[in-house]
Amino acid sequence: MSSVPILFLIYDLEPGGPELRLLDLARAFPEDRPMHICVTSRKVTLLPQYLACPCHVTVFIEPVAKAYLDIAAMLRIHRYVRRHGIRIVNSYDIKGLILATAIRLLSGNRVVTVHHTVDLLHNFSLLHKLALAILLRWTTAVLCNAHFIRRFIETSYVSSKRIHVVYNGIDAGLFRKNEALRNHYRRTYAIGDDETVIGTLANFRKEKQYPFLLDAFYRIRKRHSRVRLLCVGGGPDFDAIRSLAATMGLTDVVFTGYVEDVVGHLSAMDLFVFCSQYEGLPNAILQAMSMELPIVSTAVGGICELITDGEEGLLVPPNDMDAFLKAVFDLLDHPERGKVLGRRARENVLTRFSLETMVEGYDRFFRQLVPSNAETL
């Protein structure tokens, strides 16, 4: 049977959730399923890793300033679609969705379109939400990575018949405890053997609630003096949060910025915390689960589909300082309980949220959408 090529339209290749998840997919997708990835900006930090993917993955850059004005770029992408016999176009953002819709119309609806929604659109303006509602009428299917997001989308934008859920997956063979890396990074950041590292992995954006975390850590240090806070990630609020920590006199906080060795930095942690106010299905939580880290997280978005409170981690309401501190102190004071939660969390990853399970889910979805014996362009 002939293969059905897929084009993924993505805004950039920076270290974010969709970009890293697409990278995992590109590394592991079946070889009989050609993947084409079009990047619509010049932000391509992860490009070398994408170029190292198997030969059935092709990456090209086509900067598009405004999708509804850059007709020339739109036509170039459409010609690429025709030249390579692409039948499925997958978008991740409004710009990509506009381009995908135009390609479908220019192809006489012989190309099917999929829009991937990974959050609750909290960063969308009213105009963007209106555009999304209109464009999704022309979209063949919508993919979500959590049932929480599915319920939100079907309530406001699309009928449930066109919405499908494929959970994120994690490479459990890669994300596992590494004692050598733990020792290396604790030496790198001058962390003593007797110090407990509370860590987080999240971009520095408003919804990640870093001021809340710093306030909580300030209070934790009053009860546990031998603790450090390790904040892994970068983003638009990075400098502001570092300045806030300095103003608060928090000299025991390490800000790493963006890192390539996520496994090593997670290995250096003893307790993982996550304070987000809004979430889809965060990769960081899955990575911490796979590393057997005890977790304290806000009970928002799809996190409640990953963790059952008291089974694989501890969940607390967002912005609830008393509940957050109680959960953290519980695990700091009872490390054996944390080890039990960590083991259960990794078992959950292996059973339900492995990379293999995610790839199988995507492959099955795309093959059902356009069978291999479908007519080519």
Image (cartoon, helix red, strand yellow):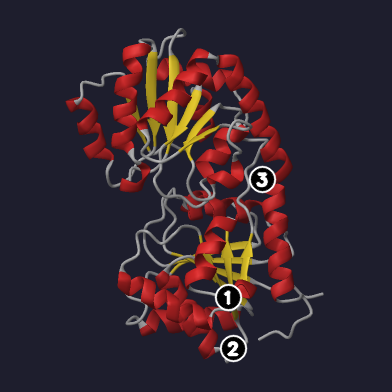
In the rendered structure, which amino acid carries the disc numbered 1? Answer: Ser
The residue furthest bottom is 108
Closer to the observer: label 1 or label 3? Answer: 1
Q: Earlier in the sequence, mark 2 or mark 1?
A: 2
**122 over 303 or under it: above or below:** below
Q: Quadrant of the N terminus?
A: bottom right
Say which residue label 2 marks.
Answer: 109
What element does badge 3 sit on? loop
Say which residue label 3 marks.
Answer: 353
Q: Residue at x 51, y 82 (%)?
A: 137
What element does badge 1 sit on? loop
Say which residue label 1 marks.
Answer: 159
Residue 241 occupies quadrant: top left
Where residue 211 appears, as percent x and y from the top left, is 28, 35
Q: Residue at x 31, y 34 (%)?
A: 212
In the rendered structure, which amino acid carries the disc numbered 3? Answer: Phe
Where residue 219 appears, as percent x and y from the top left, is 31, 20
In the rendered structure, which amino acid carries the disc numbered 2? Answer: Asn
Where residue 298 appears, as percent x and y from the top left, is 46, 39
